[in-house]
Amino acid sequence: MDEWHTMWAAWDFITRQMIPPSMLFQKPIDLRHICLFYCGHIPAFLSIHISKLLGEPDTEPVEFKYIFERGIDPIVDDPTKCHPHSEVPQHDEDWPSLGSILEYQSRVRERVMKLYRDIQSGKVTLTRKIARVLFMTLEHEAFHAETLLYMLLQRAGTGTLPPTGFSPPVWSVLAESWERLPAPDTLTVTLGPETLTVGHDDSEAEDDTTDVAGHEFGWDNEHPKRTVHVPEFKIEWRPVTNGEFYEFFIGEGKEQVQLPASWVEIDGEMLVRTFYGPVPMKVAKDWPVITSYDNLSTYASVKGGRIPTEPELRLFLDKFECGYEGGANIGFRNWHPIPATMGGVKDGRGHNGGVWEWTSTVFEKHDGFVPSKLYPGYSMDFFDTHHQIVIGGSYATIPRLAERRTLRNYYQHNYPYAWVGARIAYDV
């Protein structure tokens, strides 16, 4: 229950405190719905799965599920091509009101709390299937909190409200402290050859069991456990930074890469977006640059390297990622990226600054993959050769996601808005 209350508090903070009424019917980015859609999508998704699980009627008003069940991720190169999704109103006046959506949300949340009470009282027996639905819907909300935030970042300073109740960063003081951080003794570390275990065993076919305690749930693309061989390779301790990419952008890469969506040029000056408004490049120069796979792959190639494969990056993170308790910039430790610390004095352990990381591995079926019965299209709809696997987590990714080593996220290779960076790998 505590995780749910924490997640709901975060969701309510984002949707009620950072989105002004004037933005509810706006699209901060052109490849997603208006902000209001996400306010209804989260409770609708939860209601649909709770209703199916318990064999109960959908939460009223039932018609909400037809509007809000599923969002969109159209092909960037041709937005007319998109996976199956809900048909949404085309005019502002045809959408449900925010008030009616919030009332609906309250009814859905009470159904979740009642299920927990029934489990605690013994009225309902906790099975792995019940636990899976609760896991899936909680993590779904966490994913969408981050989606909504990276959308809202595009309007920070021109619509989106900064997070209230937090002291605004004193950028000049932070920049001075970041300048004093030591650089790694070497640019790269050599790893492999090594046999790596990836994935975990989490079959929905076993969900009738009451053996729940200690079981690690995941999404369908995390199953099953398997081994892969990782040849010897070199990889940079830290992701490509804003400063490094900026020098490339204005120099040898000028005609080869796109302007990162995490940057904005105002009055001839290149700035980096934050929820407190854009900051000068000199403040954010050591943060990991957030930009598309295509941009970073081009950068890596020109520098004589490449983007690491998923197993290569997984091996690196297994050895050197410090996790939330070790100071990683995940779980809203900050409301912005910070400089990476990997390759430092703690046997190289540290964090990457607060971004997901691109891999060169295309998101596709792997040996033993079985699509989810609860959410069949979660992975299957995106085995389209357009999506790359990303792993890790950003400053807005909750620790239960960012710290599960089997987690695999995915974005289109030319999608510019997600909070993803990359480090360079080299063949040996």
Image: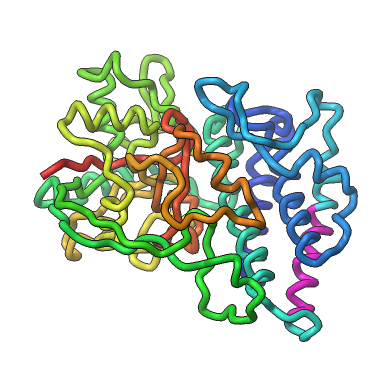
Q: Is residue 41 above or below residue 300?
A: below
Q: Nearer the viewer, residue 399 or 174?
A: 399
Residue drawn at point x = 59 percent, y = 28 percent: 31
Q: Is residue 78 above or below residue 273?
A: above
Residue drawn at point x = 59 percent, y = 72 percent: 206
Q: Quadrant of the C terminus?
A: top left
Q: Nearer the viewer, residue 294 or 108?
A: 294
Q: Nearer the viewer, residue 412 or 226?
A: 226
**Looking at the image, which residue sits at the far front?**
367
Colouring of the image: rainbow
Q: Position of residue 43 (x, y in %)?
A: 75, 52
Indicate the quadrant where residue 152 lies: top right
**Looking at the image, which residue sits at the far bottom?**
122
**Residue 28 visible in image:** no
Q: How many marks?
A: 0
Q: Quadrant of the N terminus?
A: bottom right
**Residue 13 visible in image:** yes
Residue drawn at point x = 18 percent, y = 35 percent: 305
Indicate the quadrant where residue 308 lies: top left
Q: Position of residue 404 (x, y in %)?
A: 43, 63
Residue drawn at point x = 72 percent, y = 38 percent: 37
**Magenta segment, which residues?**
105-119
Q: Position of residue 361 (x, y in %)?
A: 35, 42
Q: Is residue 45 above or below residue 85?
A: below
Q: Position of residue 190 (x, y in %)?
A: 13, 53
**Magenta region includes residue 124:** no
Magenta span: helix, strand or loop, mainly? helix
Left or right, residue 221 beside residue 307:
right
